[in-house]
Image (cartoon, helix red, strand yellow):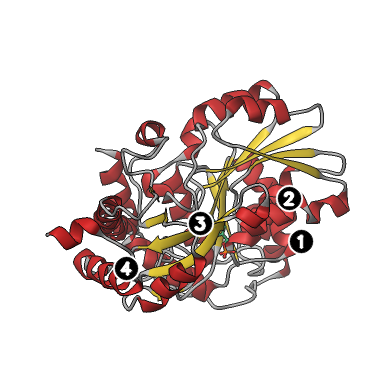
Amino acid sequence: MSERQRQHSLVTHDEHDDRHYGAVHVPVYDSSLFTFPSVAKMDRADIEGSYIYSRGNNPTVNELERKLALLEGGERARCFATGMGAISAAVLSVVRAGDHIVCVNQVYRPARKLMGNYMRRFGVEADFVDGSDLSAIEAAIGMKTKLLYLESPSSLLFELQNLKACVELARRHGIRTIIDNTWATPCYQNPLKYGVDIVVHSLTKYIGGHSDAMGGVVIGSEQLIGELDRNELILLGSVMQPQIAALIVRGLRTLPLRMERHQSGAIAVATYLETLPFIARVRYPGLSSHPQHQLAEEQMSGYGGLLSFEAGLDREKLIKFIDRLTYFRIGFSWGGYESLVSLQERIVDPPASNVPIVRLYIGLEEPEDLIRDLKAAFQSTGFNDERERSE
Ligand SMILES: *Cc1c(COP(=O)(O)O)cnc(C)c1O
């Protein structure tokens, strides 16, 4: 069975057990606590693995965790209220006062703020380096480094890290690795396979998939996730609600199908954008023009629906272009059924010369409609497309 087939059957056809009266969909156990028939039974709750209190374990949430662990190829998963809940728990589970973190430059901004600013309060320092440059990562590793934090591809510039090489480097220095795998999803990249210690996802994006729920997950070995479970999950308490877990299980059912559709739409749009003379650069790891396309092909098996492009430095013109789009709704985030657009910035030195970047999220609409929408907005904004004119 291919990996893709295995994942399809895992998400669609996986719970023929008799715990829930033959229910097809996981029932919502919306109970904050669970009771016992006797004190003796309650005393044995931990040993017998009985449910006690939903901040610790809840059957609906556990079902989502079981599926996500299987999908990523991990021993154990724990869910959180948001992706940031999962990220902060994972980081806190690895570092102590006096430790140092090496993190890739293009990391999700709130994660950067957590490691670069907030954690200083607790005596944890971080350095941010170019993740595509292995020697830069190695140079940043010092005596106090305990964590290498990765995000591959990143979610604006889509820069990759060589996972195998990063893990090899981290192991040589005895440091842990965490990766944010939200962009690729478990369908298209399984970092545990390369030896990464902890994988985190924002379930708010593709996995939930319908823009109606927030969540996060950490996945890894029994030992690492067990520790995190006893400490950061229970003590900080950013846990997932059972109603949300059921929504996300429902989203998960169609994840492989949706990813294929997002990807074919994104390839169509990216290919169209590449033909336009006024577009300086299209960023999408699935394009052969992506500087790390070779590495992407090696360590990923697909690319999904998020891409970005640069079209000159005129912010006002780009804003006009975005305002004129009708299919693409203006918004951050991604992973739902609806196509989105946002204006962001590629940070350069000095910051005054930051480059505007348009990020597109290709939803489940007809790619032809989306391309027509882009075309019309480019034309009415006065982007000069010579090729189109001569046609
Ligand atoms: C959205 C996102 C997060 C944070 O997830 P939330 O559920 O919003 O907390 C983390 N990493 C990446 C790459 C994201 O896109």
Instruction: Name the residue beneath numbered marker 1.
Output: 235
> Gap in Å between the C-alphas at discs 3 and 4?
44 Å
> Gap in Å between the C-alphas at discs 1 and 4?
51 Å
Q: Is mark 2 within 8 Å of ligand 1?
A: no
Please report the residue visible at 42 percent of the width from the left and 35 percent of the height from the top.
Answer: 292
Quadrant in which residue 375 is drawn: bottom left
As helix, strand or loop, the secondary structure at mark 2 comes to helix
As drawn, 157 above or below 289: below
Give how far across and how far down residue 221 sits, in percent: 58, 40
Quadrant in which residue 35 is drawn: bottom right
Instruction: Name the residue beneath numbered marker 3.
Output: 65
Marks 3/1 in contact by CB < 8 Å: the verdict is no
**Quadrant that contains the N terminus:** top left
Task: Name the residue type under label 4.
Answer: Phe
Give how far across and how far down residue 24 sits, in percent: 31, 69
Indicate which disc, 4 or 2, sits on the residue closer to the N terminus: 2
Indicate which disc, 3 or 1, sits on the residue closer to the N terminus: 3
Give how far across and how far down residue 217 sits, in percent: 55, 56
Indicate which disc, 2 or 3, sits on the residue closer to the N terminus: 3
> Gap in Å between the C-alphas at discs 3 and 1?
19 Å
As helix, strand or loop, the secondary structure at mark 3 comes to helix
Instruction: Name the residue beneath numbered marker 4.
Output: 378
Foreground pick, 17 / 213: 213
